[in-house]
Image: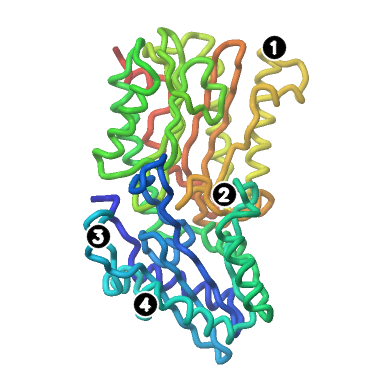
Amino acid sequence: MARNIFLTQDELKKRRHHFARTFLGDRDLLLLFAGSEQRLRNGLDNVYPFRQDSNFYYLTGIKESEAIFILTKTEKGEIREILFVQEKDPLKEKWTGYRLGKEAAKEISGISDVYYLNQSEGIISQLFNRSQRVWIPYPYKGTLNEETSQEVLRINRFKEGFPHLRFLNALDLLKVMRTRKSPLEIKFLKEAVKITKTALHKTWKKMKPGMTEYQIRALVEYEFKRQGGDIAFNSIVAAGENGVVLHYVECDKVVEEGELVLFDVGAEYGLYSADITRTVPISGRFTPEQLKYYNMVLECNKKVIDVACQGTTLGELNSIVVETLQKRLIEDGLISQPEEIGKYYYHGVSHHLGLDTHDLGQAREAGLPVNSVITVEPGLYIKEKKMGIRIEDDIVIKRNQALNLSKSIAKEPEELMGIMKK
């Protein structure tokens, strides 16, 4: 099944060697920890479905929890890769599922030095004593409990135990690497978008007034799973006034005749995420007022895709949207001054896309490199008209243009109404 798709050994080895050659000095060490299972509610064996830490998966291809990866360069410039995984335990595996073990971990990752976790403390101590600098990804800024997260607590313990070491944040280094996508990564993203397209088009044909938002969402997510994909993030299906809430979560409204329904959804394939937004009329046809504002957003979407190429910045792309909407809304009479645009458009037009829906990427002020992947998602949110409109595509940046991965997902009004013909 698609959810068991793995990155190739060749891809993973290239990434690790590139990181070591580009970023590690002699006697430097990169240390990554896999994610941990999180308890769901109160049951001892009741856990959330596990999803691997993206940085860990990016360099190892390992999807199992609790693992540890070390990439080190000796004082002679030799590169060594070490992986620690959970011990095989037949009794525990009866309750919580099979563990990879060393041989399977070697086969997936291409790392020859694989040990069980009970050996990790001694080996890590030896490597720390021979090293000068240790790179660890610190938590994302703004993360909940950022200062007391497991990563920070680990780093503080290491600092106490090995005062000779300098501990540095590897997150910025991984941002540089993960911004530019390989052909295999783009292939996975294309498949995620393809799954999303099928789910949306099928759902639009089936939905009708009187259904709830959650019933419509269930149709989308069923199609993700049916096609062998997974759900990349909490799917947003927001009808009417709910469409003005960017991260709407309740999803319990009955959709009424004549309302717009905003879909912000994405399938995941091989842990790579699509992120698509479309806004459609539940009744199958736009009203003249809905169509007027929809076409303003569509104009912005097309302008940004036409301009996006190597060297443009996310800030420049967003300025195109702001300036276009200012002009159109002043002409419309909805606003009288350009600065009023913030009432109706209040987010950036793009973010990086990849292993995470909001993927690691270079700063908004940095020029986009070839083969970076971003979203294009202008929107208008007019609460007094109970109308939220957003149109989002996923694009690959090329030298002189952008490749629109989601070009075949209907967004022209005539296309949408044709699919939804009741």
Q: Nearer the viewer, mark 1 or mark 2?
A: 1
Label 3 element class: helix
Where is the C terminus found, in terms of image quarters? top left
Q: In the image, 37: left or right of 344?
A: left
Q: Label 2: which residue?
A: 309
Q: Dot 4: few (<14), some (14–19), or many (≥20) neighbours within 10 Å? A: many
Label 4 element class: strand
Foreground residue among 92 and 145 = 92
Q: Is residue 315 visible?
A: yes
The image quadrant of residue 322 is top right
Above/below status of 284 relative to 17: above
Q: Which mark is residue 115?
A: 4
Q: Indicate the position of residue 80 as horizontal and vertical percent values.
A: 46, 82
Q: Earlier in the sequence, mark 1 or mark 2?
A: 2
Q: Earlier in the sequence, mark 4 or mark 2?
A: 4
How far is the residue under mark 1 from the one under mark 4?
Answer: 67 Å
How far is the residue under mark 4 from the one under mark 3?
Answer: 19 Å
Q: Label 3: which residue?
A: 93
Amino acid carrying label 4: it is Tyr
Q: Label 1: which residue?
A: 333
Q: Indicate the position of residue 390 as horizontal and vertical percent values.
A: 52, 27
Q: Residue at 37%, 69% (x, y): give it.
A: 85
The image quadrant of residue 157 is bottom right
Q: Dot 3: few (<14), some (14–19), or many (≥20) neighbours within 10 Å? A: few
Q: Residue at 44%, 66% (x, y): give it.
A: 59
